C-alpha cells in the first residue's frame, strides 16, 4: 500500500532543551542531557520510507529543519506542555511554506488537552491520543481521519474525537526502534551526566503499577498496567545494540520501572550478562537483595531511583508506596553489591515546608548516591497533583519554564513560597556536590581516564552555568491553562 511521505519531528527549541519523546521532565537541565525519541521512533519504524528528525540534540536550526521538511506530505510533531507554544509556532511555519502539508501533534499534552491543542492553531490538522504506532500508520496510509481510532480532528470547524485506540495486546508486534536510530540519529548526540558516553536506551515495557500523584507518563500515556515484551524480544534488542554500535558503553532500560517484575528482571539479566555490555535501569527502592545480586552479577552498573523526599508524610501524600526504612535497606544492599545509584528528588510536593526540605537534604547526604538530581514539582495537566494544586489554590497557571527553558517554581504553599523552594534547589546541589568526599569521587576516575576528564570538565562548566540560567526571570507561557477542572 502506498503511504504518505512522512516526517516524524522533534522541532527546534530552546538551546539544550530536552523536550523530546523520551524526556520525563521537559526542560533544559543542570548538565546538557538528551534522551532518545523512542515514542516517535516506534511509528517511524512502522511507516515505510519515513524519516525521524530530532532537532534539539543535533543542533538543527529552524531554517534547516524547515528546508528539510518542505516536501513531506505528513509531518508529526511530538510536543509537551512546556514546549507547546514553540511547537505550534513551528507547525505554523511548516504550513506557511507548504499549505497542503498535513500536520499532527502527539504527546501527553495532546492526550489530556485535545481540544485546546487543536484550537491553538488552524495549522494543526489532527492530534493523537495515547497509542501512536498503529494510529499514525493509518494516517500515513491515507485512511479517512474519521475512520482512525485514537485521533481528534476537525469537521467543518468543529472538533471531533474518535474512539480511543486500545493498547496493542502483544508488545512484541511493536517494531524495534534500533534501525530508525541507526538510519536517522547520531548517537553521539545523546548523553546525560550519569551514564558513560555513548549509551543506548531501550524500552521493554510500558506503564507503571505505582500510583504516584505527580508522575506524568502513567497518568497520561503509559497507564498503570506494566505491559512488557517477551523476555526473548527484550534480550534480542539488547544483543543487537553492540552489533549496530560497537562503541556503546552502556545500555539503559528506560521502562518506568524495569524491576517491577522480579522474575522477568532476573530472566533478562541472566541472558544479557554474557553479552558483556554494562547496563542500567529505572528501579523502585524496594528491590530485594537477591534480585539486585543477580542484576549486578550480570552487568548492571547503575539504578535510577526516585527517592523524591526524605520526609515520610510527603511520600505518603504522593502515594509513593515506599517507606524511608525500606529505602535505607535498599541503598545499603546496593552499596554492599557496589551498584551505583542516581537519586532523583523533588522539591514542592504536597506537604512541603522549609523543615521538610532540610530533611530531604540530610536524607540525600545520608544515602550518598553516586549522583543525584533535584527537580521542582511540575503540575503537569493530566496528573492528580495538577488537579489537587488547582483545587487548593497552589497553582493558577504560572509558567513552568523561564526564557532559557529552565524549570522554575510553579507551585507555592502557605508554609513555603515558590521563591524559597527555588532557592533550595541551588542550596541542595551545592551542599551535596561541594563536599570533599563527593568531589574526590568525581575527580578520582578522571586521573586515569582522559575522555572522562574532558567530559566532566565540560559538565562542570555547564553545572556552574546552570545556576545563572535559573536566575532568568522572563518566561515562556504555560500551555494548558484552560484544562484546569
Image (cartoon, helix red, strand yellow):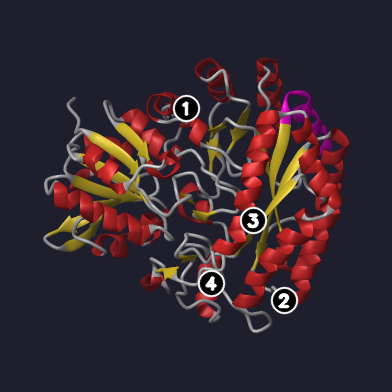
Residue 292 falls inside the magenta stretch: yes
Q: Quadrant of the N terminus?
A: top left
Q: Residue at x 36, y 29 (%)?
A: 45
Q: Are marks 3 and 2 in contact (CB under 8 Å)?
A: no
Q: CA distance from mark 1 to mark 2?
A: 46 Å
Q: Residue at x 74, y 76 (%)?
A: 354
Is any part of residue 163 visible from this angle? no
The residue pinned by badge 3 equals: 464
Secondary structure type for disc 3: helix
The residue pinned by badge 1 equals: 172
Q: Residue at x 59, y 49 (%)?
A: 31
Q: CA distance from mark 4 to mark 3?
A: 23 Å
Mark before the other along the chain sequence, 4 or 1 = 1
- In screen coordinates, is 160 left or right of 317? left
Q: Residues within 10 Å of mark 3 (few under 14, many from 20)?
A: few
Q: Residue 229's spot in the image, x, y percent?
A: 53, 30
The residue pinned by badge 4 equals: 410
- In screen coordinates, is 464 left or right of 398? right
Amino acid at each position: 500500500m502506498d503511504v504518505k511521505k512522512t516526517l516524524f519531528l522533534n522541532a527546534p527549541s530552546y538551546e539544550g532543551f530536552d523536550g523530546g519523546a523520551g524526556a520525563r521532565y521537559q526542560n533544559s537541565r543542570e548538565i546538557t542531557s538528551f534522551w532518545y525519541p523512542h515514542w516517535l521512533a516506534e511509528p517511524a519504524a512502522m511507516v515505510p520510507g519515513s524519516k525521524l528528525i530530532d532537532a534539539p540534540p543535533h543542533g538543527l536550526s529552524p531554517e534547516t529543519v524547515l528546508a528539510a521538511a518542505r516536501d513531506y506530505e505528513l509531518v508529526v510533531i511530538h510536543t509537551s506542555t512546556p514546549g507547546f507554544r514553540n511547537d505550534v509556532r513551528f507547525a505554523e511555519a511548516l504550513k506557511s511554506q507548504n499549505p497542503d502539508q498535513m500536520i499532527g501533534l502527539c504527546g501527553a499534552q495532546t492526550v489530556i488537552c485535545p481540544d485546546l491543542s487543536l484550537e491553538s492553531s488552524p495549522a494543526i490538522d489532527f492530534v493523537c491520543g495515547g497509542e501512536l504506532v498503529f494510529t499514525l500508520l493509518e494516517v500515513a496510509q491515507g485512511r479517512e481521519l474519521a475512520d482512525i481510532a485514537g485521533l481528534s480532528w476537525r469537521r467543518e470547524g468543529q472538533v471531533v474525537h474518535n474512539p480511543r485506540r486500545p493498547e496493542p495486546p502483544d508488545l512484541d508486534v511493536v517494531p524495534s526502534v534500533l534501525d530508525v536510530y541507526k538510519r536517522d540519529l547520531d548517537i553521539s548526540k545523546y548523553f546525560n551526566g550519569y551514564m558513560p558516553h555513548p549509551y543506548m536506551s531501550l524500552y521493554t515495557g510500558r506503564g507503571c503499577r505505582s500510583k504516584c500523584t505527580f508522575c506524568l507518563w502513567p497518568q497520561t500515556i503509559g497507564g498503570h498496567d506494566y505491559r512488557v515484551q517477551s523476555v526473548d524480544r527484550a534480550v534480542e534488542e539488547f544483543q543487537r545494540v553492540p552489533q549496530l554500535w560497537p562503541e556503546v558503553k552502556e545500555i539503559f532500560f528506560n521502562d518506568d520501572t524495569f524491576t517491577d517484575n522480579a522474575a522477568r528482571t532476573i530472566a533478562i539479566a541472566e541472558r544479557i550478562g554474557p553479552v558483556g555490555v554494562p547496563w542500567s535501569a529505572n528501579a523502585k527502592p524496594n528491590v530485594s537483595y537477591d534480585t539486585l545480586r543477580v542484576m549486578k552479577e550480570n552487568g548492571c552498573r547503575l539504578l535510577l531511583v526516585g527517592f523524591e523526599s526524605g520526609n515520610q508524610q510527603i511520600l505518603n501524600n504522593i502515594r509513593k508506596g515506599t517507606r524511608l526504612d525500606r529505602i535505607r535497606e535498599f541503598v545499603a544492599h546496593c552499596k554492599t553489591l557496589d551498584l551505583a545509584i542516581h537519586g532523583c528528588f523533588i522539591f514542592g510536593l504536597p506537604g512541603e515546608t522549609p523543615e521538610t526540605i532540610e530533611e530531604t537534604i540530610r536524607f540525600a547526604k545520608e544515602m550518598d548516591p553516586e549522583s543525584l538530581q533535584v527537580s521542582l514539582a511540575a503540575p503537569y495537566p493530566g496528573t492528580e497533583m495538577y488537579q489537587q494544586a488547582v483545587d487548593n489554590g497552589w497553582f493558577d497557571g504560572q509558567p513552568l519554564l523561564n526564557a532559557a527553558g529552565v524549570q522554575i517554581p510553579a507551585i507555592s504553599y502557605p508554609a513555603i513560597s515558590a521563591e524559597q523552594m527555588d532557592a533550595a534547589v541551588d542550596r541542595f546541589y551545592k551542599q551535596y556536590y561541594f563536599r570533599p568526599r563527593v568531589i574526590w569521587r568525581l575527580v578520582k576516575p578522571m586521573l586515569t581516564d582522559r575522555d572522562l576528564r574532558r567530559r566532566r570538565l565540560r559538565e562542570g562548566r555547564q553545572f556552574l552555568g546552570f545556576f545563572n540560567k535559573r536566575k532568568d526571570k522572563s518566561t515562556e507561557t504555560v500551555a494548558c491553562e484552560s484544562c484546569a477542572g
